[in-house]
Amino acid sequence: MMYKKSNVVVGLTTVNTEMLQISVPALGRLRQKFTLVIYNDNPMVALSRRQIRKLGYCGDLQIINGTENIGTARARMAVVDAAIDAGIRPEWIIFCDDDDMLVDLSVPDVSNDNFAVIQNAIVIRHRICDLLRAMDNATDMDADGENIELARPNVGFAGTLMRWHVVRAMFDEMRKIIDAIQKIDDGLEWRAPVDAMMWSFMNIFAKHENPNAVPIYMDKINYVKNKIDTPRIKYGKLAMPLRNPEEHWRRVISRYNAVMNATLDAAALRGDD
């Protein structure tokens, strides 16, 4: 696969800023040039440029310190808003969670119909020693199917390279339905599947705008997912119900999708396309 010069924003959202000791050093080791935009969703802690520099990242940087906790979806939208306000006009954007690692940022030369580049991820399940090894050298990790897994492909919003203009336009639609999304979230007894929801929205919106739009798969590891802390530890909620988790997941994603489809259909009827 051919590659092209990088023109990328990396969006990093954080609540526990101590976790940036995992994600930021990995970003500092990337060979490719990019602009890092960090949204700090913890109003109790102010994040400074000096702190990020001490962690090893010395490239272009924008930091937004939130005044209230707004959640992952809104934080990601705020990353895009901050990039726009700063006059940044990239071709691509990729999001990273604060306790994960982005380990490669190669941009393939792909068709304009390819709105996203799906790659592979290493998933660390249980052991701190595996996380420390990944922080030292993520390319020297072998999947064992238990402690370290290979997500091939890694399907989701975080860790996927996406076209900037599609993400920006999709976020404009998300803002129209954010209250409806929140209503669904509030009705769940488990943590809302924000990443899966946003990836599903991305596919729906891209297809709505361009019937030929498709993601493309590149068989390469670019992301490390840290799953040592469970959602109950990190967020105080289960990731899924204990009974029939897959069925519950499908149903809630269908509810989110219905909201997005409804707003796109309404816009088409009004002639907003």
Image (tube, rainbow, N blue to C red):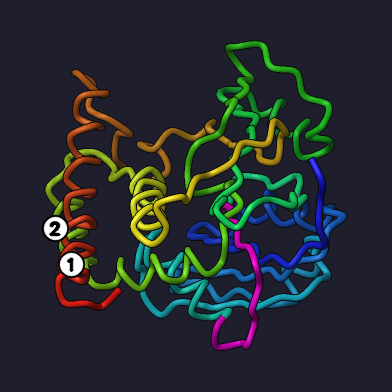
Q: Which region shows up in magenta?
A: 84-97
Q: Which mark is residue 183?
A: 2
Side (left or right) of 21 relative to 63: right
Q: What residue type is labelled 1?
A: Asp
Question: Label 1: few (<14), some or many (≥20) within 10 Å?
Answer: few
| Kind of residue indicated by mark 2 | Lys
What percent of the width, then of the height, locates residue 183? 14, 58
Q: Residue 51 has which mark?
A: none
Q: Name the residue under label 1.
A: 179
User: Where does the image place residue 268, in percent across and percent down from the top left?
Assistant: 21, 69
Q: Which residue is drawn at 48% across and 79% down?
A: 81
Of residues 20 and 185, the one nearer the viewer is: 185
Q: Residue furthest right?
A: 31
Q: Nearer the viewer, residue 266 or 49?
A: 266
Q: At x 61% / y 20%, what residue is drawn?
A: 149
Q: Do the residues labelled 1 and 2 touch (CB within 8 Å)?
A: yes
Quadrant of the rendered image containing residue 240? top left
In 3D space, how far apart are the residues under numbered discs 1 and 2 (Cα atoms)?
Answer: 6 Å
- Asked if the magenta segment contains residue 169, the reply would be no
Left or right side of 194 for 111:
right
Q: Residue at x 15, y 68 (%)?
A: 266
Rendering coords of residue 10 (x, y %)? 64, 62
Q: Quadrant of the N terminus?
A: top right
Q: In this view, does 83 lie above or below 154?
A: below
